[in-house]
Amino acid sequence: MQMSAGYFTLTNSATQPINITHVTSPQFEAVEKHESVIEDGMARMYPLGDLMVPAGSSIVFEPGGKHLMLMRPIGEFDVVTLQFHADKAVLLTVSVALTN
Ligand SMILES: [Cu+2]
């Protein structure tokens, strides 16, 4: 396994918008934000820029839509930690169990 995809719903319950610039994980050398689209009947994916989450709303990462690409795993693990960054600040750290 050299690559995994991450799906989740991110809810901003604060009263200010948040802007996620990048996502990292200690278990992977690289994490990219992507969006899948269908073009001419072919599924393609594109890198996403900053993710703006308006106050009180959610963005959904799901198969066929936005997702995280987790690339080049480091060692063996059962739990993946994801850190959502706004520039140099870590906004959110979550740990999730791997599923197939
Ligand atoms: Cu992708």
Image: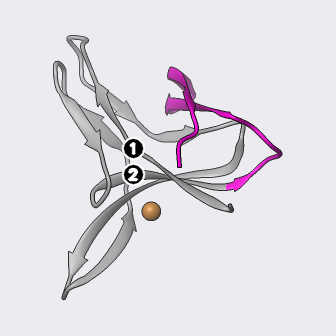
| Residue name at image x 68 percent, y 62 percent | 2
Nearest the viewer among 50 and 73 is 73
Query: Given the image, on which type of amino acid does mark 1 rest?
Result: Tyr
Q: Is residue 20 above or below residue 71?
A: above
| Res 83 → quadrant | top right
Q: Magenta stretch: give its range.
A: 72-100
| Residue name at image x 57 percent, y 31 percent | 97
Residue 32 picture location, percent across and down = 51, 54
Q: State which quarter of the image contains the N terminus.
A: bottom right
Q: Is residue 74 highlighted in magenta?
A: yes
Residue highlighted by disc 2: 67
Instruction: Give the SS element for disc 1.
Output: loop
Specify whether 68 is left or right of 71.
Answer: left
| Res 59 → quadrant | top left
Which circle marks residue 47 in the picture?
none
Residue 14 picture location, percent across and down = 25, 11
Mark 1 or 2, closer to the camera: 1
* Tag 1 and tag 2, C-beta contact below 8 Å: yes
Q: Is residue 100 above or below residue 16?
A: below
Q: Is residue 21 above or below residue 18?
A: below
Residue highlighted by disc 1: 7
| Residue name at image x 17 percent, y 26 percent | 57
Residue 77 picture location, percent across and down = 75, 37
Query: Given the image, on which type of amino acid does mark 2 rest?
Result: His
CA gap between label 1 and label 2 equals 6 Å
Instruction: Give the SS element for disc 2.
Output: strand
Q: Spot the residue most to the bottom.
A: 40
1 or 2: tag closer to the N-terminus: 1
Residue 23 picture location, percent across and down = 53, 40
Nearest the viewer among 49 and 99 is 99
